[in-house]
């Protein structure tokens, strides 16, 4: 009889945890997974999937307006928030069910309760009290919204977890934060007819992205009617009654709103998991410190996904979980490479980016040639919309290698996914130049830029 109840115990049934569990089970491992909330994790339940559906809904506003320029006569469109909210909730439920079926089909035992680590090989299930002995433990608990720094009265605000379930559409919303979550929701609700104010302590949005992209997105958000309060912090929030909250700012007038969305960041979800007591080293914000193979300081405990605070993206968590399972149980060792990962920000206009920004490339010592193009998309020439697309190539001047591609505009995420293949393969600017343009398209600009930026 084995000294272990299972070969692998996974804590967290999100994207990374479920992938690892299914792959490990496919290799013949006995696997158990525990989830204290809903199966599917952040991406499916309260992240990328419902958010992208909200983004689609918000963009119909401009589609209706654009149609007139192409000869369509439409009645005045009206929007019903409960219809969208409930349709998205139903889709989330459907997807959560598919995740469950996938685990069950792979033979993974599911425990819907909180699990806490009690030692290098022990996990305690909190509701039932069962103690499970596992040969390997995988922590895949993701991240959780953090009101950081704490704001007096911050409990009057909501996080991105609750924004999908608002009982009614507010007339005014304050969004606190300057990262992609804050900007995406500000963009969505502004297009749904809400008067949105975005307040951020920094002097620009999207820290860490290419400066030309940051500046152009900031201007586009302002043009869309979002009131930007940059270089400002909130001192406190008070309830004025009647469903209205007031945010008192360190500078400038206070801001009144029915909903205050605090999107100032997320932290790894490790509090109370017992990891430190089991000997696992955690970082300054609670992240599990792991090596390139996702191994923690305790040999039998690994971690993948946002809980490690490496690259906090769903496809990265999935790849990390798959690599762990193949390596540990399949006899096929490989590791997730974090060097080149494409990402998108689903604001309107949206961002697609892969590789180094101009600033990162310079800091790494590269001598650069910068190619860029800004233009009005073909659709806007008829619709009359004052819309722009911006594309930028960051190229190493000595090797001609394309170090980064950055796009702001319609379908930027779709375009960058294809371009990421070329960048990952080490394409040069000459390779881009040798590619025949697909005309007429916005993406053809990527292979027709010939003159580097002066200076």
Image (tube, rainbow, N blue to C red):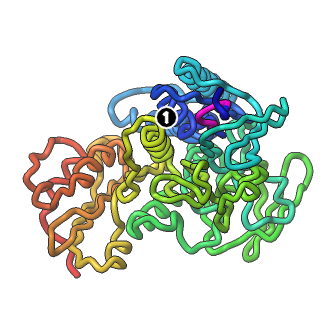
* 366 left or right, relative to 52: left
Rendered position, 192 above or below 435: above
Provide the residue designation for mark 1: 60
Was residue 6 drawn as part of the magenta stretch in this picture?
A: yes
Residue at the farthest right position: 241
Report the number of numbered marks: 1
Is residue 450 visible in this depiction of the protein?
yes
Q: Which residues are magenta?
A: 5-9
Place residue 429 in its image quadrant. Answer: bottom left
Rendered position, 216 above or below 50: below
* 16 left or right, relative to 160: left
Q: Position of residue 43 (x, y in %)?
A: 57, 39
Q: Main secondary structure of the magenta part?
A: strand
Element under disc 1: helix
Between 351 and 114, the one lying in front of the other is 114
Between 97 and 370, the one lying in front of the other is 97
Q: Quadrant of the N terminus?
A: top right
The residue located at (54%, 58%) in the rendering is 290
Place residue 18 in its image quadrant. Answer: top right
């Amino acid at each position: 009889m084995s000294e272990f109840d299972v070969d692998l115990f996974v804590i967290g049934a999100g994207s990374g945890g479920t992938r690892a569990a299914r792959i490990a089970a496919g290799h013949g491992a006995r696997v158990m997974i525990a989830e204290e909330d809903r199966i599917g994790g952040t991406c499916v339940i309260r992240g990328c999937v419902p958010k992208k559906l909200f983004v689609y809904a918000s963009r119909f506003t401009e589609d209706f307006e654009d149609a007139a320029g192409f000869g369509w006569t439409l009645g005045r469109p009206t929007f019903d928030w409960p219809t969208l909210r409930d349709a998205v909730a139903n889709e989330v439920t459907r997807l959560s069910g598919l995740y469950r079926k996938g685990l069950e089909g792979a033979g993974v035992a599911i425990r819907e309760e909180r699990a806490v680590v009690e030692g290098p090989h022990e996990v305690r299930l909190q509701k039932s009290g069962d103690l499970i002995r596992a040969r390997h433990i995988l922590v895949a608990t993701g991240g959780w919204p953090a009101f950081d720094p704490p704001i007096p009265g911050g409990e009057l605000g909501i996080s991105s977890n609750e924004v999908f379930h608002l009982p009614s559409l507010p007339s005014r919303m304050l969004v606190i934060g300057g990262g992609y979550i804050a900007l995406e929701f500000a963009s969505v609700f502004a297009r749904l007819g809400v008067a949105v104010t975005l307040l951020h302590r920094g002097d620009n949005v999207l820290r860490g992205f290419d400066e030309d992209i940051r500046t152009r997105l900031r201007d586009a958000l302002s043009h869309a009617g979002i009131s930007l309060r940059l270089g400002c912090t909130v001192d406190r929030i008070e309830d004025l009654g009647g469903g209205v909250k007031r945010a008192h700012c360190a500078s400038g007038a206070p801001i009144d709103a029915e909903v205050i969305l605090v999107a100032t960041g997320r932290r790894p979800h490790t509090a109370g998991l017992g990891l430190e007591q089991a000997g696992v080293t955690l970082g300054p914000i609670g992240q599990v410190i792991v090596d390139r193979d996702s191994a923690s300081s305790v040999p039998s405990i690994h971690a993948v996904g946002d809980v490690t605070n490496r690259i906090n993206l769903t496809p990265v968590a999935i790849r990390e979980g798959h690599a762990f399972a193949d390596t540990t149980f399949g006899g096929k060792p490989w590791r997730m490479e974090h060097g080149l990962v494409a990402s998108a920000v689903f604001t309107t206009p949206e961002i697609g980016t892969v590789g180094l920004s101009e600033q990162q490339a310079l800091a790494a010592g590269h001598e650069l040639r910068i190619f860029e193009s800004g233009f009005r998309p073909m659709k806007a020439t008829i619709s009359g919309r004052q819309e722009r697309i911006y594309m930028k190539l960051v190229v190493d001047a000595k090797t001609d290698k394309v170090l980064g591609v950055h796009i702001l505009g319609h379908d930027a995420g779709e375009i960058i996914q294809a371009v990421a293949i070329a960048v990952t393969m080490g394409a040069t600017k000459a390779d881009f130049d040798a590619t025949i343009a697909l005309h007429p398209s916005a993406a053809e600009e990527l292979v027709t830029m010939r003159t580097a930026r002066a200076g």
